[in-house]
Image (cartoon, rainbow, N blue to C red):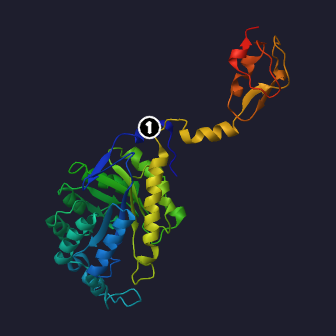
Amino acid sequence: MVKLGKKLLEECLVSSSLKIDGFEIYDGSDCYVIAEIGNNHQGSLAKCKEMFRVAAECGANAVKLQKRDNRSLYTKAAFDKPYEHENSFGLTYGEHREFLEFGKYEYVELKEYAKKVGITFFSTAFDFPSADFLAALDMPAYKIASGDLTNIPLLKYVAQFQKPMIVSTGGGTMADVQRAYDAIMPINPQLCLLQCTASYPANFEELDLQVINTYRAQFPDVVAGLSSHDNGIAMAVAAYVLGANVVEKHFTLNRAMKGTDHAFSLEPTGLRKMVRDLRRTRQAMGNGEKKVHLSERQAVVKMGKKLVAARDLPIGHVLTASDIAIKSPGDGLPPYLLENMIGKVLTQPLQADESIILTSLADG
């Protein structure tokens, strides 16, 4: 685990921002939430539209699909490999992937529908033809999957489109991340690096959330985020507090649906709660200024303490420590003034439990 010192943490605060479809992402902004649909639509345009609508209702900023040119992406052996099990949509892996793949018609429909329901839509480009396909549709951003972290030719190619790039870093070393950063930034500085653990689902002890701080220190000119494959919503909030200004979570309408990704995806209730908690977290963070809120004052008075007379005291009495008691409520002189009261002369008598006030004192 990387432990950051004060100086290194200060370096993390160098300003970085990213704008996607008009939404500006920066330290202090709301967390940008991506509902990763992937192939959870099961090849159904209608179901995918429903997922777009529900994700928008849950408060997500964006929905994301995955685009592959299957024939050129996979070797013939991989494409033709038998793929017969409960989550398969074809007899071979290629048939399975082709069944789930959307083409131009579906993407155009989905782009218009996303605009209608008020959510940003983009996709992961898995290969050069898919990148060109998405560029022709003028997608507002590009996602690069963890598997392509070391695919420098693809990273450079996508960078030339001059659109925001969100790169997952699962299964990679820091050397791999540095290499990707070095390849992209001279071409296109609109970059977000997502800490990711490429296991499905990911064990909590393998999430390595502190890497977010490492990214912020080593790459202060890009936005850091989290692509989280864990079961649950709490880690998104933890990541946001650490400085992850983008969070991507897989999304489904029902975890029991057919497909490999549903089991570790958030259902609508989970997505809604995660967005709610992230928005609340931003509000709860404040601006670093310690202040007394109006809502606190009644409780502070009720639970607080003040200086009172420990017993009946006559006029002209010189106060000693034994003459002063500390009692609630805290609607009088605060206890930190106790030592200042010792040696003062009473200019009027005080009854037991009566508040000591400055106007009833004179210097001894």
In this rendering, the count of numbered labels is 1
The answer to whether residue 88 is above or below residue 363 is below
Is there any visible trace of residue 249 in the rendered image? Answer: yes
Give left or right: position of 217 versus 106. Answer: right
The answer to whether residue 85 is above or below residue 54 is below
Pointer 1 residue? 10
The percent coordinates of residue 282 (x first, y second) are 44, 49
Question: What residue is shown at x 77% (from left), y 16% (from top)?
Answer: 342
The answer to whether residue 216 is above or below residue 64 is above
Q: Residue type at mark 1?
A: Glu
Residue occupying the far top of the picture: 364
- Dividing the picture into quadrants, the one containing residue 312 is top right
Question: What residue is shown at x 24% (from left), y 67% (from top)?
Answer: 116
Residue occupying the far left of the picture: 136
The percent coordinates of residue 61 (x first, y second) are 33, 60
* Foreground pick, 251 / 187: 251
Is there any visible trace of residue 38 in the rendered image? Answer: no
**SS for dot 1:** helix
Question: What residue is shown at x 50% (from left), y 67% (from top)?
Answer: 232
The percent coordinates of residue 139 (x first, y second) are 20, 63
> Label 1 neighbourhood size at 10 Å, few (<14), some (14-19), many (20+)?
few
The percent coordinates of residue 358 (x first, y second) are 69, 17
Q: Tell me the quarter of the image containing the C terminus.
A: top right
Give left or right: position of 217 versus 203. Answer: left
Question: What residue is shown at x 35% (from left), y 77% (from top)?
Answer: 40
